[in-house]
Amino acid sequence: MRIKGIAGILGLTGSLLLSPVAIAADADSAQALAKKEGCLKCHAVDKKKEAKSLKEISAKFKGKADAEEKILHHITSGEKVKLEDGTEEEHKIIKTKDKGEISNLIAWILSLGQK
């Protein structure tokens, strides 16, 4: 499974990723990173753009034990994704390798659908 390889590169394992319940996401830092990395070009926080809103993504993963791993894989693998208009393209890979920034971004995304 590719997540294991990505997690190894980042020095993370699924059990070490912090859940949004375990940490309070720094929303300002996470949103700044999402903007810097280009996430907000396709995703809005609370409405559809070219892709699902971050709140929709959060709701999709609500209560799932593997939520952090799935999002980590999605933002680091470059796999193909289907956009709202039906076209497909490779998902952008975030450039930061800072484990804290990545964990905070994931925790923030997951917290959006919990409110």
Image (cartoon, grey):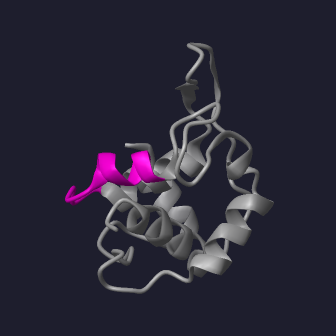
Residue 50 lies in magenta, yes or no? no
Task: Decide: is 4 above or below 19.
Answer: above
State whether residue 16 appears in this view.
yes
What residue lies at 55% left-to-right and 27% top-to-bottom? 81
Q: Quadrant of the N terminus?
A: top left
- The quadrant holding residue 9 is bottom right
Task: Decide: is 41 above or below 82.
Answer: below
Q: Residue furthest right?
A: 36
Where is residue 65 drawn, in percent x and y? 21, 60
Residue 57 lies in magenta, yes or no? yes
Where is residue 109 drawn, in percent x and y? 48, 62
What residue lies at 57% left-to-right and 81% top-to-bottom? 100
* 114 with respect to 90 (left or right): left
- The quadrant holding residue 77 is top right
Task: Decide: is 15 above or below 58.
Answer: below
Foreground residue among 14 and 40: 40
* 34 with respect to 24 (left or right): right
Where is residue 64 drawn, in percent x and y? 21, 55
What residue lies at 62% left-to-right and 38% top-to-bottom? 78
What residue lies at 56% left-to-right and 37% top-to-bottom? 48
Q: Which residues are magenta?
A: 55-66
State whether residue 5 appears in this view.
no
Q: Quadrant of the C terminus?
A: bottom left
